[in-house]
Image (cartoon, helix red, strand yellow):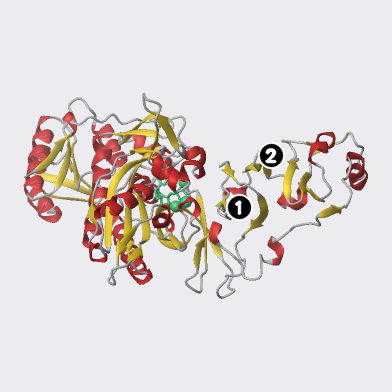
Amino acid sequence: MAQVQRMSRLMVKTLRDDPADAETLSHKLLVRAGYVRRNAAGIWSWLPLGMKVLENVSRVVREEMDAIGAQEVLLPALLPKEPYEATGRWDEYGPELFRLKDRKGAEYLLGPTHEEIFTLLVKDQCTSYKDLPVILYQIQTKYRDEARPRSGILRGREFQMKDSYSFDTTDEGLAESYALHRQAYIRIFDRLGLRHKIVSAVSGAMGGSASEEFLAPAAAGEDTFAYCPSCDYAANTEAVTFPGGEPADASAHGPVEVLDTPDTPTIETLAAFLDVPASATLKNLLVKVDGEIVAVGVPGDREVDLGKLEDHLAPAAVELVTAEDFTGRPDLVRGYVGPQGLEKVRYLADPRIAAGTAWVTGANQEGRHARNVVAGRDFEVDEYLDVVVVEEGDPCPKCSTGLKLDRAIEIGHIFQLGRKYADAMQLDVLGQNGKPVRVTMGSYGVGVSRAVAALAEQTADEQGLCWPAEIAPADVHVVAAGKTAQTELALSVAEQLGEAGLRVLVDDRAGVSPGVKFTDAELIGVPKILVAGRRTAEGVVELKDRRTGEREELPVAEAVARLA
Ligand code: ATP
Ligand code: MG
Ligand code: MG
Ligand code: MG
């Protein structure tokens, strides 16, 4: 069936100017070209052109997931609280989780990721080792109340994710399911035309042991990864660990002054120790009592009021760390102390930090959080641990060659979860010997909507979007540059291309100048542009390659044959 879409009947309103709030290229262009429309912070509508691209991404993801034997399902996004309580994530997930109540007061959440619900599904459906291994997936709307939902669809609060989950009875089985996903992801991103890199990652709130991220290098990315030019080492900077500690020049920590006293120190003792008056407020100070942070002062942000420390003092080791010591860069860090200790740390603008080359690691009792710090992005740590700066040239942990750094967008993440969720929800199947076996799991995500923006980031140019063929909303954009004769020719060429199996967008709009049509064609970014213009009478059209800008005049039949 011919797939010809007339622009005169397409709901698309292109804009000449960038939206005022847009910071990234993909945000600007996807809005200007009429692909998406903002409803609220991090909440987006997909318009007809955008929908085509989103569907193309989903199709590629589906085909490759099906190819590894994964089965598609669709679970709800509105979820009961209990399973998430069972795993502890109802609380652990923190403020990113959308929690809500129904009319009876029962609590629910909008799913940010679905490990719990899939675990329950398999517990219900699979009873014997013969039912495993199984891989289930869905392409579904996810909800996360992101602290900074900027960057358009790169970071939505509602977004599309392909999430899959593998269930195996053995560690080898899990390793195999993981390897299948890794291969499928490589094929997905290759087919989408996304340049990507696989890096070691930290598992964060998901838990589990091993995890790797698929990163798409792009300036707009919020992640930074380190890679080695001479071996295969590549890791998110969050996950870089240096054997034997950080490289010497990166661990710029000054002396920590410890006031170790058998008696409860007084404000006067502290003041004398610091050589300041007892009424002093200090900006460059972090105070720990028995390893617990009780106060932090930061230049330009907060001060430690010595007088107010009274309640915290106990016969204890009191550590007094000046801000220079605890940040290494006191001018760059802000933080404050809340009930949990140092709750938030935020880096201020700095070209080096903006390049994502610094991070803070912190950990709660389970030793979980370890975040990369990205300029302007808040994050939580339950306990301040350390500040490490990875710089270009730091030694590769594998071979000591100087590391290189690059910015990237996280487009996929694969986890070997192990038995964390199966333990929490007692997911067992009957083993070969008739005894119950605890199931081991993997979890795997692709940012489907984010991939659209990542592709835009990697492929767009000054004129606009510029889609790879597999993903473009059409194969050919036919432009009628003139009056009736040109429009007739354009429609007839469009029809022929459609008959040949191509997806065609034809700009048959009346009363729109050729100049505007050309600009729109460049902005919309279909890979081939065919123009019925000044040589229409001779039956000659112009064929233009959107990416290279190369153009050629040729008779209609030849142009059709060339494209088909
Ligand atoms: P990020 O570090 O960017 O916040 P994440 O590590 O929290 O992402 P995962 O939990 O690993 O995300 O989810 C799997 C995939 O879902 C990610 O690799 C990413 O491609 C996508 N994704 C995550 N958060 C968002 C979001 N807010 N908007 C769009 N896509 C997202
Ligand atoms: Mg996140
Ligand atoms: Mg991440
Ligand atoms: Mg991730």
Of 372 and 526, the residue lying toward us: 372
**Height in image: 534 above or below 125?**
above
Quadrant containing the N terminus in the rendered view: top left
Q: Residues within 10 Å of mark 1 (few under 14, many from 20)?
A: few
Residue 496 - label: none
Which residue lies under the disc numbered 1? 365
Residue at 61%, 60% (x, y): give it. 390
Q: Secondary structure at mark 1?
A: loop
Observer able to see residue 251: yes
Left or right: residue 16 versus residue 480 is: right
In this rendering, does residue 532 appear at all? no
Q: Are marks 1 and 2 in contact (CB under 8 Å)?
A: no
Q: Quick check: 382 above or below 110?
A: below
| Left or right for 53, reference 115 | left
Residue 440: x percent and y percent?
37, 62
Q: Which secondary structure lies at badge 2?
A: strand
Say which residue appears at 8% left-offset and 39% top-offset.
537
Which three-letter amino acid code belongs to the residue tagged 2? Val
Q: What residue occupies the far bottom of the structure in this picture?
A: 399
Would you name the residue on which mark 2 appears?
A: 337
**Among the 4 quarters of the image, the one containing residue 211:** bottom left
* Mark 2: few/some/many CA within 10 Å (<14, 14-19, 20+): some
Residue type highlighted by circle 1: Gln
